[in-house]
Image: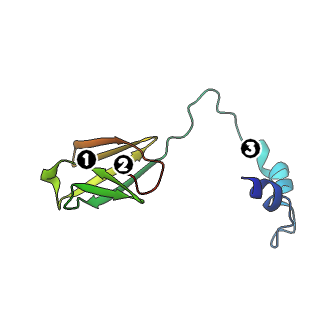
Amino acid sequence: MWWMREVADVRIHGTTGERPIDRFQKEEAAALHPLDGRPPFCQIQEVRRIVHNDCCVDIGTNRYSVPWKYIKEEVTVQVVAEEVIISQGPIEIARHHLCLGQREQ
């Protein structure tokens, strides 16, 4: 964030010949509207994974467990806010708190 605010936004852009912050304030800022109490955008990451022999799926560098009967099965993994939701078809089979570190289980 610091680099964007202190370096990228204030240097002259090679294509436009303007500082990005000046261009934003002149052309784009007026088009933005306040959220008026609406909740922030909820981003969902959804991926498909095959359950490993140790009953886990990998998301990034972290591993999340599922019931043993899903070994070698394809599952859908959704990362929503601070939760990992694992399902097969319409059935939720596991739910975990999102690990923010690396190589956690």
| Up-down relation of residue 84 to residue 52 (above or below) | above
The answer to the question of whether label 2 and label 1 lie on touching residues, with beta carbons closer than 8 A, is: yes
Mark number, residue 10: none
In front of the other: 32 or 99: 99
Residue at image mark 2: 78
Earlier sequence position, callout 3 versus callout 1: 3
> Measuring 54% from the left and 40% from the top, which residue is drawn there?
41
| Disc 3 to disc 1, C-alpha distance | 40 Å
Residue at image mark 1: 87
> Measuring 34% from the left and 59% from the top, which residue is drawn there?
58
Q: Is residue 19 left or right of residue 51?
A: right
Q: What's under tag 1, amino acid-wise?
A: Ser
> Measuring 26% from the left and 55% from the top, which residue is drawn there?
56
Q: Is residue 42 left or right of residue 77?
A: right
- Asked where in the image residue 95 lies, by quadrant, the reply is top left
Q: What's under tag 3, amino acid-wise?
A: Ala
